[in-house]
Amino acid sequence: DVITSISRAEQSQITVTFRLEKDADSAAADVRDRVSRVRAKLPKSVDEPVIAKVEADANPIIWLSFSSPTRSALEVSDIANRVVKPRLQVLPGAADVRINGERKYAMRVWIDRDRLAAYGLTPADVESAIGQQNVELPAGRVESQQREFTVTARTDLNRPEEFGAIIVKQVRGYPVRLRDVGRVEVDAASVRSSVRFNGESAVAIGVIRQATANPLTLAEAVRESVPVLNAELASEGVQVNVSYDSTVFIDRSIEAVFKTIMEAIILVAVVIFFFLHSARASVIPLVTIPVSLIGTFTLMLIAGFSINTLTLLALVLAIGLVVDDAIVVLENIFRHIEEGMKPVEAAVQGIREIGFAVIAMTLTLAAVYAPVSFTTGRVGRLFVEFALTLAGAVIVSGFVALTLSPMMCSRLLRHEERRGPITSAIERFLDRLSENYRRLLEWTLRRGLLIGGVFTAVAVLSGVLFVNMKQELSPIEDRGVIFTVISGPDGASLEYTENYARRIESIGKTLPEVDRVFVVAGNPTVDQAVAFLRTVDWSERDRKTVEMIRQIQPQMASIPGVLAFPNAPPSLGQSIRDRPVSFVVTSSDSYDAMGRTVGLIVADVMKNPNFLGVDTDLRLNKPELSITVNRERAADMGVSVEAIGRAIETMMGGRQVTRFKRAGDQYDVIVQVEADARNTPDDINKIFVRNQANQMVPLSSLVRVQETIGPRQLNHFGQRRSITISANLAPGYTQGEALKLLEESAAKHLTAGYATDLSGSMREFVRASGSLGITFVLALLFIYLVLAAQFESFKDPVMIMLTVPLSMLGALAALQATGGTLNVYSQIGLITLVGLITKHGILIVEFTNQLREQGREMRDAVVEAAVLRLRPILMTTGAMVLGAVPLALARGAGAESRSQIGWVIVGGMTLGTLLTLFVLPSVVLFFDRLRSRRSHALGHA
């Protein structure tokens, strides 16, 4: 799909992102093959390239924090690494375990630069002495006729005093030991990151799941280990806490969906009882719910699908869908029984009349979801299970409606002569409704131009609303956490970042809903940090996280010295660092020139207050020390460039010389100058090296040290130099609006040789919008082909599908009124709506055709068909709308996404049904007149 790279000092990372259809194992093999071809071209001193296969969502799903009031961070880190990490690595479903704030033991040899020079020694002498005297060699064995001894030679060193006793060199007959030119201690190998949990220093362990593992099961296993670990580590003075758990949102959202399913079932039952006013009759369609769901679960098991948020969301929609076919069958059989026919005869006659329409409706709705399964990209892959689950539920319900429902009707339904007062009142209301509908329908059929105008106006309004709807990848969900990224200035130290991270921590604590604050400084570099502000459970608070973000964003933005921006984590599995805006500019120009050009776009963006925390990944002001070797003077004085380089590396950066053992594990031995001797650029000049004449030469006579600035990192995108503009968006401002502004600014400022691209969620947004648009068109095409095959007509499917724009207006208006957007969830809802609304058209057109075959005149046939189908249409609409109401009014985890689909169904079905009942009969008459005129014209010809 795309190749990107990030090159920093001493490290370069190349990321190859493949399309989802590419097999990951074969892709990794291809990459290894390509890397091996160019390995010989790399410098010999470069470490062997590491090739790792990483899943798109390979981030820890749960973090544990380890803290202690009595132990140092080094000790706590060692306990976490030796005791806890191996346990978590073997948990079922765990792919890897990551440690933040880690302090690894090391034997630190701190060199006193002045004393080293006074003895006439160099860093190379120290390294050589340690390497020669700290060795571990096999000594063999001693064999005799009766016994055998394994010989072990203790040649390695393990304690600081042992290393301090190493003789570096004999100087004028006096042994100079390591302790004479420095000090030795066991300390941390490096301090490049730190962790704080609820205001206390800690070490954090994150567990990454395998691609096929159930995150809920893995997280539960990790949580169950916490009490055990606390009991075991109590004697060590270490306390373990769950600092962040991303699966809480998944668990709560699944609970909410199950609750929604139960609410939908109750509401559907109320609708059925209202229209049929019979407990016996109501049982029949309600039985199809568990039967269809069990059948759907069976299909999911066969297909290898899991029970997740999206498949459960499909089942919520299925509650209203699966009863539709049963309601249509039941109502037709019920009508015949009410007219005096015996139950068995009514069941046979009813299914004979309605069977074709049920098959057509089932295949139509299933056909809607067929194109979704071919949607490309990450978002498309996510919704495949949703689409196929819903399609499976519809097919199972259609089969149940054609088999189980007629049988139950013949056994349970009876003609009731006497009705109660409530039942009689409902029946009278429905009868009056049918008569009023008949009169109003006959009135509208005489005013074809009015109906044509209404249809045109609805279609135009739908188009205008669609074009002007805000667009984004997915709505901002309340996932129970606020994720804050902190970026310090280039060259900032870890201490600098930690100080500002504490200020972010204190701002987070001002939110009464926040109960846990988890901060990681030095991730991924020492000038950056991330903070997780975890809120209490959804049931324990009134405000959403987006409201909290709106409160603290100005406070964080006003902090001088750092760039801090709170954000809600993305909802479709992207990285938590992924920002809503990721606009890439590529060119072959120099980075300086690119920076000036991109700066013009950034200036335009920053004029818009809806862009928050605007930043680029090009920083050209990182402070550096540039060392230039005077090669001629070095050659004259008998000093090699290699000796100069190694001395600087050892003294300033630290050099790993050998290893030592501690508690059964091996750790590094690192040689480095004392910290107070590497604070200023002039400290480099004070390092001494030995020349060939055995004389000590200061680097001040061999090198020139200059303070300069350079890039923090250099980026490539698609093998071209790149700069990425990233930003957060104010609530209510969408990715579609942001992208439009960026593209307009880029068109104004970019010259020949420049190009633009997208990354992250913005790339997914554009790809999903395009693929779902194609899916919508394909859904219409599939429905047309299915209906054409069913009705053996090209005209009838056209009439039926004219109901689609009638429903779009209600769906888009409902979205607009509730603050919704066009996103993957609402677009899936629109695709679902296409199949739902065409079911009404199928009922009216099919019944009209049956009456026409019986010799009825077209106008009478269409009126009679519409009136007879009014009750099942209202029943199915009521069941679908009320079944979707719990979605539309959802609260809690993941409610924002569910409500978008719910409002699409509620608005689209309500207005679409109302308009269909009057517009479709007029369309049928209009097409009949066209046919008559054509036949008349051919007759005269």
Image (cartoon, helix red, strand yellow):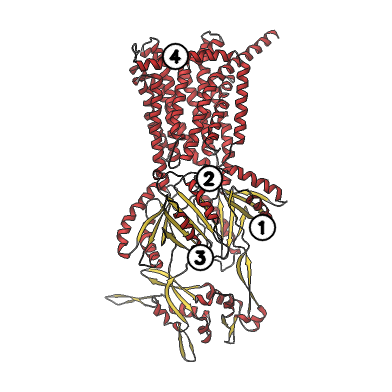
Q: Which corner quadrant holds the C terminus? A: top right
Name the mark nearer the viewer: 4 or 1.
4
Numbered disc 2: secondary structure: loop
Give above or below for 813 relative to 348.
Answer: below
Three-letter amino acid code at the position of disc 1: Gly
Residue at the extreme bottom: 172
Along the polypeptide, which appears first: circle 2 or circle 1? 2
- Residue 144, x across and y down, in percent: 30, 77
Along the polypeptide, which appears first: circle 4 or circle 1? 4
Name the mark nearer the viewer: 3 or 2.
3
Disc 4 designates what residue?
431
Numbered disc 4: secondary structure: helix
Q: Is residue 76 found left or right of 656 in the rendered image?
A: left
Q: Exactly how many numbered labels are in the figure?
A: 4
Three-letter amino acid code at the position of disc 3: Leu
Along the polypeptide, which appears first: circle 2 or circle 4? 2
Name the mark nearer the viewer: 2 or 1.
1
Numbered disc 1: secondary structure: helix
360 or 41, nearer to the observer: 360
889 or 786, nearer to the observer: 889
Q: Do tag 3 and tag 2 residues touch (Cβ < 8 Å)?
A: no
Disc 2 designates what residue?
20
Q: Is residue 132 found left or right of 39 in the rendered image?
A: left
Along the polypeptide, which appears first: circle 3 or circle 2? 2
70 or 586, nearer to the observer: 70
Q: Label 3 to label 2, Cα distance in Å?
A: 38 Å
Disc 1 designates what residue?
595
Disc 3 designates what residue?
494
Do we see residue 436 in this rendering? Answer: yes
Q: Label 2 to label 4, Cα distance in Å?
A: 56 Å
- Residue 494, x across and y down, in percent: 50, 65
